[in-house]
Image (cartoon, helix red, strand yellow):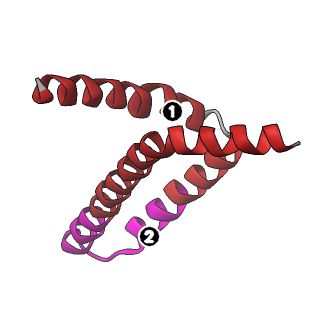
Amino acid sequence: MENTIKVAFDEILDEQIHQIAYRKCINDHEYRIANTKAITLMDMLKRALSNDEQRIILNDLENAFYIAESIFLEYCYRQGIEDSQMIHKKLSVLMLQK
């Protein structure tokens, strides 16, 4: 039973992160500017490298950064879900105090 729940949770998480959240992100003006700059700089750096071995190393480094960042973001998202009830409770208390 626990495995079924985990699979269902992972599917929901995947949908939220990889579809809905990503669409919101790519529509963000600041993200588009930062992403365009990163792509431009990476292309400039690749062209500045003198041989294929250096370009392969740069590509591997870029991929490693993307993988590490996506793992970090998944942990952030999961932590947000875990903390959501506590956050809502604290917000409710604050609203009642006003």
Q: Quadrant of residue 27?
A: top right
Q: Position of residue 11 (x, y in %)?
A: 27, 24
Name the residue at 54% across, 44% down: 86
Name the residue at 38% across, 44% down: 78
14 vs 26, left or right, is: left
The answer to which of 7 and 63 lies nearer the viewer is 7
Q: Residues within 10 Å of mark 1 (few under 14, many from 20)?
A: few
Q: Amino acid at mark 1?
A: Ala
The answer to which of 5 and 89 lies nearer the viewer is 89
Question: In terms of sequence position, does the residue under pointer 2 or pointer 1 come before the other?
Answer: 1
The answer to which of 59 and 45 lies nearer the viewer is 59
Q: Position of residue 58 (x, y in %)?
A: 30, 69
| The C terminus, quarter of image | top right
- Residue ranking furthest to the right: 98
Camera-near label (2 vs 1) is 1
Q: Amino acid at mark 2?
A: Leu
| Residue assigned mark 1 | 21
Q: Residues within 10 Å of mark 2 (few under 14, many from 20)?
A: few
Residue 75: mark: none
**Range covered by the magenta-colored residues:** 40-61
59 vs 20, left or right, is: left
Of helix, strand and loop, which mostly describes the magenta segment? helix
* Element type where label 1 sits in the image: helix
| Residue assigned mark 2 | 45
